[in-house]
Image: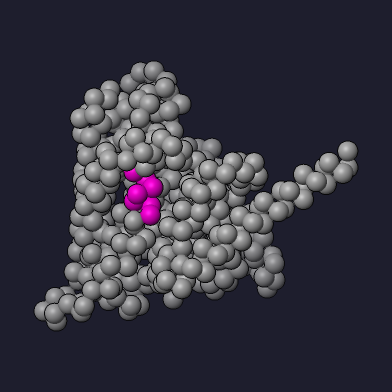
Amino acid sequence: MLAAVGSETARAYLELGAVILALGLGARLSSRLELSPIGLYLLIGLVLGSLDIPQLSGDFVEFAASLGVILLLFLLGLEYTAQELAENLRRFLPVGIADAALNFPPGVAFGLLLGWEPLAAVLLGGVTWVSSSGIVAKALGDLGRLGNRETPAVLAVLVLEDLAMTLYLPLIASLLVGGGLLAALGSVAAALSAAAVVLVLALRYGSVVGRLVEHRSEEAVLLTALGLVLIVAGIAEKLQVSAGVGAFLVGIALSGEVAHRTRALLAPIRDFNAALFFLFFALQIDTRALLDVAAPALVLAVATAGTKIATGWLGAARAGVGRRGRARAGLTLVPRGEFSIVIAGLGVGAGLEPQLAPLAAAYVLVLALAGPVLMRFPDALPALPARFAPDGARGPSTLRRP
Protein backbone atom coordinates (compact mmCIF):
# COMPACT_ATOMS: atom_id res chain seq x y z
CA MET A 1 0.00 0.00 0.00
CA LEU A 2 2.73 2.45 1.04
CA ALA A 3 4.77 1.48 -1.99
CA ALA A 4 1.84 2.25 -4.28
CA VAL A 5 1.28 5.63 -2.62
CA GLY A 6 4.98 6.39 -2.87
CA SER A 7 4.97 5.46 -6.55
CA GLU A 8 2.03 7.78 -7.26
CA THR A 9 3.69 10.61 -5.35
CA ALA A 10 6.95 10.11 -7.22
CA ARG A 11 5.06 10.17 -10.54
CA ALA A 12 3.32 13.39 -9.54
CA TYR A 13 6.65 15.01 -8.67
CA LEU A 14 8.21 13.87 -11.94
CA GLU A 15 5.31 15.05 -14.11
CA LEU A 16 4.90 18.42 -12.42
CA GLY A 17 8.66 18.91 -12.35
CA ALA A 18 8.94 18.19 -16.07
CA VAL A 19 6.06 20.61 -16.82
CA ILE A 20 7.56 23.41 -14.73
CA LEU A 21 10.98 22.79 -16.33
CA ALA A 22 9.35 23.10 -19.77
CA LEU A 23 7.85 26.44 -18.69
CA GLY A 24 11.29 27.52 -17.49
CA LEU A 25 12.83 26.66 -20.85
CA GLY A 26 10.05 28.62 -22.55
CA ALA A 27 10.81 31.62 -20.32
CA ARG A 28 14.52 31.34 -21.19
CA LEU A 29 13.78 31.22 -24.91
CA SER A 30 11.40 34.18 -24.73
CA SER A 31 14.04 36.17 -22.82
CA ARG A 32 16.61 35.40 -25.51
CA LEU A 33 14.13 36.51 -28.19
CA GLU A 34 13.17 39.57 -26.08
CA LEU A 35 9.50 38.59 -26.16
CA SER A 36 6.84 38.13 -23.51
CA PRO A 37 6.77 34.44 -22.49
CA ILE A 38 2.96 34.25 -22.64
CA GLY A 39 2.82 32.90 -26.19
CA LEU A 40 5.29 30.12 -25.43
CA TYR A 41 3.40 29.18 -22.25
CA LEU A 42 0.23 28.82 -24.33
CA LEU A 43 1.96 26.70 -26.98
CA ILE A 44 3.47 24.46 -24.29
CA GLY A 45 -0.02 24.04 -22.83
CA LEU A 46 -1.43 23.00 -26.21
CA VAL A 47 1.30 20.39 -26.65
CA LEU A 48 0.93 19.04 -23.11
CA GLY A 49 -2.85 18.96 -23.45
CA SER A 50 -2.51 16.35 -26.19
CA LEU A 51 -0.44 14.10 -23.87
CA ASP A 52 -3.20 13.63 -21.26
CA ILE A 53 -1.07 14.16 -18.12
CA PRO A 54 -3.29 13.39 -15.07
CA GLN A 55 -1.46 15.76 -12.71
CA LEU A 56 -2.32 18.73 -14.93
CA SER A 57 -6.06 18.20 -14.50
CA GLY A 58 -5.94 18.24 -10.71
CA ASP A 59 -7.29 20.83 -8.31
CA PHE A 60 -3.79 22.03 -7.39
CA VAL A 61 -2.97 23.27 -10.90
CA GLU A 62 -6.41 24.86 -11.30
CA PHE A 63 -6.08 26.71 -7.99
CA ALA A 64 -2.51 27.81 -8.74
CA ALA A 65 -3.65 29.10 -12.13
CA SER A 66 -6.47 31.18 -10.64
CA LEU A 67 -4.06 32.48 -7.99
CA GLY A 68 -1.78 33.63 -10.80
CA VAL A 69 -4.44 35.99 -12.18
CA ILE A 70 -5.29 37.27 -8.71
CA LEU A 71 -1.64 38.09 -7.95
CA LEU A 72 -1.09 39.66 -11.37
CA LEU A 73 -3.91 42.11 -10.75
CA PHE A 74 -2.97 42.68 -7.11
CA LEU A 75 0.58 43.71 -8.02
CA LEU A 76 -0.76 45.83 -10.86
CA GLY A 77 -2.97 47.63 -8.33
CA LEU A 78 0.10 48.42 -6.21
CA GLU A 79 1.26 50.79 -8.96
CA TYR A 80 -1.58 53.26 -8.29
CA THR A 81 -3.31 54.95 -5.40
CA ALA A 82 -7.03 54.94 -4.65
CA GLN A 83 -7.29 58.61 -5.64
CA GLU A 84 -5.63 57.88 -8.99
CA LEU A 85 -8.03 55.01 -9.61
CA ALA A 86 -11.11 57.14 -8.91
CA GLU A 87 -9.77 59.98 -11.05
CA ASN A 88 -8.91 57.67 -13.95
CA LEU A 89 -12.27 55.90 -13.87
CA ARG A 90 -14.05 59.25 -14.09
CA ARG A 91 -11.66 60.52 -16.74
CA PHE A 92 -11.84 57.44 -18.97
CA LEU A 93 -15.51 56.51 -18.48
CA PRO A 94 -16.34 57.76 -22.02
CA VAL A 95 -13.57 55.51 -23.35
CA GLY A 96 -15.09 52.57 -21.47
CA ILE A 97 -18.45 53.29 -23.09
CA ALA A 98 -16.77 53.52 -26.50
CA ASP A 99 -14.99 50.24 -25.75
CA ALA A 100 -18.33 48.47 -25.25
CA ALA A 101 -19.82 50.12 -28.33
CA LEU A 102 -16.87 49.12 -30.51
CA ASN A 103 -16.22 45.58 -29.30
CA PHE A 104 -19.55 44.08 -28.18
CA PRO A 105 -21.63 44.52 -31.39
CA PRO A 106 -19.15 42.74 -33.73
CA GLY A 107 -19.47 39.51 -31.75
CA VAL A 108 -23.26 39.74 -31.66
CA ALA A 109 -23.46 40.47 -35.39
CA PHE A 110 -21.04 37.65 -36.20
CA GLY A 111 -23.08 35.15 -34.18
CA LEU A 112 -26.29 36.20 -35.93
CA LEU A 113 -24.58 35.91 -39.33
CA LEU A 114 -23.63 32.33 -38.42
CA GLY A 115 -27.31 31.60 -37.80
CA TRP A 116 -27.06 31.33 -34.02
CA GLU A 117 -29.95 32.10 -31.70
CA PRO A 118 -29.85 35.66 -30.24
CA LEU A 119 -28.73 34.65 -26.72
CA ALA A 120 -25.74 32.70 -28.09
CA ALA A 121 -24.86 35.72 -30.22
CA VAL A 122 -25.01 37.96 -27.14
CA LEU A 123 -22.57 35.60 -25.41
CA LEU A 124 -20.21 35.86 -28.39
CA GLY A 125 -20.47 39.64 -28.04
CA GLY A 126 -19.19 39.29 -24.48
CA VAL A 127 -16.32 37.11 -25.70
CA THR A 128 -15.18 39.80 -28.16
CA TRP A 129 -15.70 42.69 -25.73
CA VAL A 130 -13.36 41.98 -22.82
CA SER A 131 -9.57 42.11 -22.98
CA SER A 132 -7.52 39.71 -20.88
CA SER A 133 -6.46 41.46 -17.67
CA GLY A 134 -4.08 38.58 -16.92
CA ILE A 135 -2.24 38.70 -20.25
CA VAL A 136 -2.13 42.51 -20.36
CA ALA A 137 -0.87 42.78 -16.77
CA LYS A 138 1.86 40.22 -17.43
CA ALA A 139 2.91 41.81 -20.71
CA LEU A 140 3.07 45.34 -19.25
CA GLY A 141 5.46 44.07 -16.61
CA ASP A 142 7.53 42.00 -19.04
CA LEU A 143 7.92 44.92 -21.46
CA GLY A 144 8.67 47.48 -18.74
CA ARG A 145 5.67 49.67 -19.55
CA LEU A 146 4.09 50.13 -16.14
CA GLY A 147 5.42 53.69 -16.03
CA ASN A 148 4.41 54.67 -19.57
CA ARG A 149 2.08 57.63 -20.06
CA GLU A 150 -0.51 55.50 -21.89
CA THR A 151 -0.64 52.81 -19.20
CA PRO A 152 -3.23 54.55 -16.94
CA ALA A 153 -5.63 54.65 -19.90
CA VAL A 154 -5.07 50.93 -20.53
CA LEU A 155 -5.63 50.07 -16.88
CA ALA A 156 -8.76 52.22 -16.70
CA VAL A 157 -10.25 50.34 -19.66
CA LEU A 158 -9.40 47.00 -18.05
CA VAL A 159 -10.95 47.96 -14.71
CA LEU A 160 -14.07 49.36 -16.38
CA GLU A 161 -14.43 46.12 -18.36
CA ASP A 162 -14.02 43.99 -15.25
CA LEU A 163 -16.58 46.11 -13.40
CA ALA A 164 -18.93 45.82 -16.36
CA MET A 165 -18.57 42.03 -16.14
CA THR A 166 -20.01 42.18 -12.62
CA LEU A 167 -23.24 43.28 -14.30
CA TYR A 168 -23.02 41.30 -17.53
CA LEU A 169 -22.31 37.85 -16.04
CA PRO A 170 -25.20 37.77 -13.52
CA LEU A 171 -27.57 39.12 -16.19
CA ILE A 172 -26.54 36.44 -18.68
CA ALA A 173 -26.59 33.70 -16.04
CA SER A 174 -30.15 34.65 -15.08
CA LEU A 175 -31.30 34.64 -18.71
CA LEU A 176 -29.66 31.26 -19.36
CA VAL A 177 -31.56 29.57 -16.53
CA GLY A 178 -34.82 31.03 -17.81
CA GLY A 179 -35.21 33.76 -15.21
CA GLY A 180 -37.51 36.61 -16.05
CA LEU A 181 -36.66 40.28 -16.41
CA LEU A 182 -37.18 41.01 -12.71
CA ALA A 183 -34.88 38.16 -11.68
CA ALA A 184 -32.21 39.37 -14.09
CA LEU A 185 -32.47 42.95 -12.84
CA GLY A 186 -32.27 41.70 -9.25
CA SER A 187 -29.03 39.84 -10.02
CA VAL A 188 -27.57 42.92 -11.65
CA ALA A 189 -28.56 45.15 -8.71
CA ALA A 190 -26.96 42.75 -6.21
CA ALA A 191 -23.73 42.54 -8.21
CA LEU A 192 -23.60 46.32 -8.68
CA SER A 193 -24.07 46.90 -4.95
CA ALA A 194 -21.31 44.41 -4.12
CA ALA A 195 -18.89 46.07 -6.56
CA ALA A 196 -19.67 49.50 -5.11
CA VAL A 197 -19.06 48.26 -1.54
CA VAL A 198 -15.69 46.74 -2.49
CA LEU A 199 -14.64 49.94 -4.27
CA VAL A 200 -15.69 52.25 -1.42
CA LEU A 201 -13.87 50.11 1.16
CA ALA A 202 -10.69 50.26 -0.90
CA LEU A 203 -10.93 54.03 -1.35
CA ARG A 204 -11.84 54.94 2.25
CA TYR A 205 -9.94 52.42 4.35
CA GLY A 206 -6.72 51.99 2.41
CA SER A 207 -4.63 53.34 5.30
CA VAL A 208 -6.06 50.68 7.61
CA VAL A 209 -5.03 47.99 5.13
CA GLY A 210 -1.52 49.46 4.99
CA ARG A 211 -1.14 49.38 8.78
CA LEU A 212 -2.40 45.79 8.85
CA VAL A 213 0.21 44.60 6.35
CA GLU A 214 3.20 46.71 7.50
CA HIS A 215 5.73 44.93 9.74
CA ARG A 216 9.50 44.83 10.21
CA SER A 217 9.53 41.11 9.31
CA GLU A 218 9.41 40.35 5.57
CA GLU A 219 7.86 36.98 6.37
CA ALA A 220 5.02 38.68 8.23
CA VAL A 221 4.45 41.14 5.37
CA LEU A 222 4.40 38.33 2.79
CA LEU A 223 1.96 36.11 4.67
CA THR A 224 -0.31 38.97 5.74
CA ALA A 225 -0.53 40.45 2.25
CA LEU A 226 -1.12 37.09 0.57
CA GLY A 227 -3.75 36.08 3.11
CA LEU A 228 -5.55 39.41 2.82
CA VAL A 229 -5.60 39.24 -0.98
CA LEU A 230 -7.06 35.73 -0.95
CA ILE A 231 -9.73 36.68 1.62
CA VAL A 232 -10.84 39.74 -0.36
CA ALA A 233 -10.76 37.78 -3.62
CA GLY A 234 -12.92 35.08 -2.03
CA ILE A 235 -15.41 37.61 -0.68
CA ALA A 236 -15.56 39.37 -4.05
CA GLU A 237 -16.19 36.07 -5.84
CA LYS A 238 -18.90 35.21 -3.31
CA LEU A 239 -20.58 38.54 -4.04
CA GLN A 240 -20.38 37.82 -7.79
CA VAL A 241 -17.65 40.43 -8.27
CA SER A 242 -14.53 39.30 -10.12
CA ALA A 243 -11.89 37.95 -7.72
CA GLY A 244 -9.33 39.78 -9.86
CA VAL A 245 -11.13 43.09 -9.33
CA GLY A 246 -11.11 42.49 -5.58
CA ALA A 247 -7.36 41.76 -5.65
CA PHE A 248 -6.72 44.85 -7.79
CA LEU A 249 -8.56 47.03 -5.28
CA VAL A 250 -6.51 45.61 -2.39
CA GLY A 251 -3.39 46.62 -4.31
CA ILE A 252 -4.86 50.08 -4.84
CA ALA A 253 -5.48 50.36 -1.08
CA LEU A 254 -1.81 49.81 -0.21
CA SER A 255 0.58 52.73 -0.58
CA GLY A 256 4.04 53.94 0.35
CA GLU A 257 6.91 51.72 1.49
CA VAL A 258 4.68 48.74 2.28
CA ALA A 259 3.58 48.67 -1.37
CA HIS A 260 7.20 48.47 -2.55
CA ARG A 261 8.03 45.71 -0.06
CA THR A 262 4.95 43.72 -0.94
CA ARG A 263 5.65 44.00 -4.66
CA ALA A 264 9.20 42.65 -4.25
CA LEU A 265 8.11 39.79 -2.00
CA LEU A 266 5.18 38.58 -4.09
CA ALA A 267 6.66 39.03 -7.58
CA PRO A 268 8.30 35.55 -7.73
CA ILE A 269 5.10 33.86 -6.51
CA ARG A 270 3.11 35.85 -9.07
CA ASP A 271 5.39 34.81 -11.93
CA PHE A 272 5.20 31.11 -11.03
CA ASN A 273 1.43 31.06 -10.70
CA ALA A 274 0.91 33.27 -13.75
CA ALA A 275 2.88 30.75 -15.84
CA LEU A 276 0.57 28.00 -14.56
CA PHE A 277 -2.47 30.14 -15.42
CA PHE A 278 -1.51 30.46 -19.08
CA LEU A 279 -0.58 26.78 -19.18
CA PHE A 280 -3.92 25.76 -17.62
CA PHE A 281 -5.80 28.04 -19.99
CA ALA A 282 -4.25 26.29 -23.02
CA LEU A 283 -4.82 22.84 -21.52
CA GLN A 284 -8.60 23.42 -21.65
CA ILE A 285 -8.57 23.92 -25.42
CA ASP A 286 -9.55 20.89 -27.51
CA THR A 287 -7.08 21.15 -30.38
CA ARG A 288 -9.13 18.72 -32.52
CA ALA A 289 -12.14 21.06 -32.52
CA LEU A 290 -10.08 24.13 -33.45
CA LEU A 291 -9.66 23.25 -37.12
CA ASP A 292 -13.41 23.36 -37.87
CA VAL A 293 -13.73 26.93 -36.58
CA ALA A 294 -10.28 28.24 -37.52
CA ALA A 295 -11.43 30.39 -40.45
CA PRO A 296 -14.34 32.20 -38.75
CA ALA A 297 -12.25 32.63 -35.58
CA LEU A 298 -9.45 34.25 -37.59
CA VAL A 299 -11.87 36.62 -39.35
CA LEU A 300 -13.44 37.63 -36.03
CA ALA A 301 -10.00 38.03 -34.41
CA VAL A 302 -8.76 40.38 -37.13
CA ALA A 303 -11.94 42.47 -37.04
CA THR A 304 -12.03 42.87 -33.26
CA ALA A 305 -8.29 43.41 -32.96
CA GLY A 306 -8.98 46.52 -35.03
CA THR A 307 -11.78 47.68 -32.74
CA LYS A 308 -9.58 47.18 -29.66
CA ILE A 309 -6.78 49.17 -31.26
CA ALA A 310 -9.31 51.95 -31.82
CA THR A 311 -10.32 51.75 -28.13
CA GLY A 312 -6.74 52.08 -26.91
CA TRP A 313 -6.01 54.87 -29.37
CA LEU A 314 -9.00 56.86 -28.07
CA GLY A 315 -8.01 56.27 -24.45
CA ALA A 316 -4.39 57.31 -24.93
CA ALA A 317 -5.45 60.33 -26.98
CA ARG A 318 -7.69 61.40 -24.11
CA ALA A 319 -4.62 61.16 -21.86
CA GLY A 320 -2.70 63.48 -24.21
CA VAL A 321 -0.32 60.77 -25.43
CA GLY A 322 1.39 60.91 -28.85
CA ARG A 323 0.78 58.58 -31.76
CA ARG A 324 3.31 55.92 -30.86
CA GLY A 325 1.87 55.70 -27.33
CA ARG A 326 -1.66 55.53 -28.73
CA ALA A 327 -0.62 52.62 -30.94
CA ARG A 328 0.97 50.89 -27.94
CA ALA A 329 -2.21 51.36 -25.90
CA GLY A 330 -4.39 49.92 -28.66
CA LEU A 331 -2.20 46.89 -29.30
CA THR A 332 -1.87 46.24 -25.56
CA LEU A 333 -5.65 45.74 -25.33
CA VAL A 334 -5.84 43.22 -28.19
CA PRO A 335 -5.48 39.94 -26.20
CA ARG A 336 -8.64 38.24 -24.95
CA GLY A 337 -8.48 35.57 -22.28
CA GLU A 338 -9.98 34.47 -18.99
CA PHE A 339 -13.34 36.28 -19.07
CA SER A 340 -13.94 35.28 -22.69
CA ILE A 341 -13.54 31.62 -21.76
CA VAL A 342 -15.80 32.03 -18.71
CA ILE A 343 -18.51 33.60 -20.88
CA ALA A 344 -18.31 30.83 -23.47
CA GLY A 345 -18.42 28.28 -20.65
CA LEU A 346 -21.78 29.68 -19.49
CA GLY A 347 -23.21 28.98 -22.93
CA VAL A 348 -21.80 25.45 -22.98
CA GLY A 349 -23.26 24.71 -19.54
CA ALA A 350 -26.67 25.89 -20.72
CA GLY A 351 -26.54 23.72 -23.86
CA LEU A 352 -26.48 26.64 -26.29
CA GLU A 353 -24.84 26.71 -29.71
CA PRO A 354 -22.28 23.80 -29.89
CA GLN A 355 -19.83 25.88 -31.97
CA LEU A 356 -19.62 28.60 -29.31
CA ALA A 357 -16.96 26.91 -27.17
CA PRO A 358 -14.51 25.91 -29.93
CA LEU A 359 -14.98 29.23 -31.74
CA ALA A 360 -14.31 31.18 -28.54
CA ALA A 361 -11.29 28.99 -27.75
CA ALA A 362 -9.79 29.45 -31.22
CA TYR A 363 -10.52 33.18 -31.15
CA VAL A 364 -8.92 33.65 -27.74
CA LEU A 365 -5.93 31.53 -28.69
CA VAL A 366 -5.23 33.61 -31.81
CA LEU A 367 -5.38 36.90 -29.92
CA ALA A 368 -3.61 35.60 -26.81
CA LEU A 369 -0.69 34.46 -28.98
CA ALA A 370 -0.66 37.46 -31.31
CA GLY A 371 -1.26 40.14 -28.67
CA PRO A 372 2.08 40.01 -26.80
CA VAL A 373 3.91 39.98 -30.16
CA LEU A 374 1.92 42.92 -31.55
CA MET A 375 2.61 44.93 -28.38
CA ARG A 376 6.26 45.21 -29.38
CA PHE A 377 5.50 46.58 -32.84
CA PRO A 378 5.25 50.34 -32.09
CA ASP A 379 8.64 50.39 -30.32
CA ALA A 380 10.23 48.62 -33.30
CA LEU A 381 9.22 51.42 -35.67
CA PRO A 382 11.64 54.24 -36.59
CA ALA A 383 11.33 57.44 -34.57
CA LEU A 384 8.33 59.55 -35.51
CA PRO A 385 8.83 63.09 -36.83
CA ALA A 386 9.18 65.73 -34.15
CA ARG A 387 5.93 67.42 -35.19
CA PHE A 388 4.00 64.58 -33.58
CA ALA A 389 3.19 64.94 -29.90
CA PRO A 390 5.71 63.20 -27.60
CA ASP A 391 4.41 60.03 -26.00
CA GLY A 392 6.71 59.61 -23.03
CA ALA A 393 7.71 56.10 -24.09
CA ARG A 394 9.98 55.48 -21.16
CA GLY A 395 9.48 58.58 -19.09
CA PRO A 396 8.10 58.39 -15.54
CA SER A 397 4.35 58.59 -15.33
CA THR A 398 2.87 61.27 -13.13
CA LEU A 399 0.34 58.65 -12.10
CA ARG A 400 2.98 56.10 -11.11
CA ARG A 401 3.41 55.60 -7.40
CA PRO A 402 6.74 57.05 -6.22
Tell me where residue 312 appears, x and y as whole percent.
25, 58
Closest to the observer: 207 or 185? 185
Residue 59 is left or right of residue 29, and the answer is right
Residue 157 vs 353, above or below: the answer is below
Q: Write down the quadrant of residue 164 in the picture.
A: top left
Tell me where residue 111 appears, x and y as whole percent.
25, 31
Q: Write down the quadrant of residue 182 in the picture.
A: top left
Q: Write down the quadrant of residue 107 in the picture.
A: top left
The quarter of the image holding the C terminus is bottom left
* Residue 171 in sight in this render: no
Residue 101 is left or right of residue 9, and the answer is left
- Outermost residue toward the left in this view: 387
- Outermost residue toward the right in this view: 2
Give the number of callouts: 0
Residue 200 is left or right of residue 91, and the answer is right
* Residue 122 in sight in this render: yes
Magenta residue span: 363-369
Residue at x 72% of width, y 53% of height: 13
- Outermost residue toward the bottom in this view: 386
Residue at x 87% of width, y 44% of height: 3
